[in-house]
Image (cartoon, grey):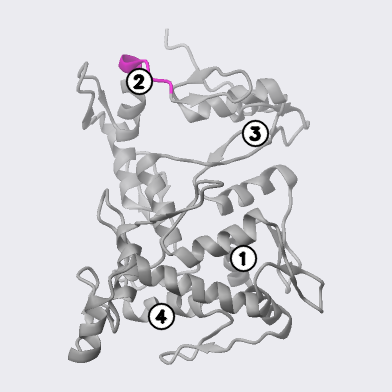
Amino acid sequence: MENELVRSEVECKRESEEIDFSDEEKNEKGKTSFDCDICGKSFSRKAKLVIHERTHTGEKPYHCEICGKSFSQSNHLTRHKSCVHTGEKPYHCEICDKSFSQNDHLTMHKRAHTGEKPYHCEICGKSFSRNNNLIKHKRVHTGEKPHHCEICGKSFSRNDHLTKHKRVHTGEKPYHCEICGKSFSQNDHLTMHRRVHTGEKPYHCEICGKSYSKNDTLTKHKRVHTGEKPYHCDISGKSFSQNNEKSYHCGVCGKSFSDGPSLTVRKYIHSSVKPYHCEICGESFSQNGCVTIHIRIHTRQKPYHCEICGKSFSQNGCVTIHIRIHTRQKPYHCEICGKSFSQNGQVTIHIRIHTRQEPYHCEI
């Protein structure tokens, strides 16, 4: 305990040396507050405002000389060193024997056993086991979004949401499936994808026992039993059990879509309208994504690489298919005879052996 007190005093002294407290002295005399120019939040001390402003700027001036990781506050760096690099975990849970490097982490962990939620929202009454979760929750009521994307200006209530959003601009997909090589921008998307390979269905309907790989799919399924139709059309007054009802219909081929933009693209296919043009050769396309892929013919850009042999491709889907040469994976199966294939299109062609379907005819 004495070591913790000494550590806290050292950290406080370090903070005071790093930040000019002359304005704080003025604050104590003049009783003025320090306001954030970005979000308007007020603070009683200049030092707290300086630390808060880093949530907007992303500034992290404190660096770990061991691993290079950066932090916005010096005490966060101190905690990081003691937690990650020393490996010391002197605080033990007497219930499950799990160990922690900090006493406050042990305190929060114990609430998993006790169910204690000491932090309460004064607006809606919802309770939380951690104060930072309460702070994030309050933004639901206040609408505060302190984390901003410097590329498009979009704002978010949580920093991790901003991190995920930035991948829309960068195209980064840091989470990779070790079975088929497919990549994802979010870890939870990878977790759900893996169930395609493992067949895991952890979500069970307590009424009929049917299982699903996704929780939202189970939620939709339950409405079969309850009859709930929470989605309403403002025009017709009709209600639906799912918000992806395919209410947009193509008048040419009869195909239905869940959103207007998909229907618009479909109409382009029928009408031969190609509003997206290549600036290099002038070739036109019905979809903007096709232009992006086409331009790589001119630039010879192949941004997607096989991690096994190093071969490069212009499309991510081509990498996914190529990797199956190495893994010998054949994830697509014929429902009639059980034969497996590495590509879905191969299954479609194979099934015609069973159905004797011959859809292509010579016009001559």
The residue at 81%/78% (across/down) is 95
In screen coordinates, is 166 left or right of 154? Answer: right
Q: CA distance from mark 2 to mark 1?
A: 43 Å
In magenta, the rendered stretch is: 297-302
Q: Are marks 1 and 4 in contact (CB under 8 Å)?
A: no
Query: Which residue has dot 3 on it?
Result: 180
Mark earlier in primary sequence (2, 3): 3
Mark 2 closeness class: few <14, some 14–19, many ≥20 residues within 10 Å: some
The residue at 77%/76% (across/down) is 93
Query: Which residue has dot 4 on it?
Result: 138
Disc 4 versus disc 3: nearer the observer: 4
Please state which amino acid type lies under the numbered disc 2: Arg
The residue at 35%/20% (across/down) is 296
Mark earlier in primary sequence (2, 1): 1
Q: Secondary structure at mark 3?
A: loop
Mark 3 closeness class: few <14, some 14–19, many ≥20 residues within 10 Å: many
> Residue 30 sits in which quadrant?
bottom left
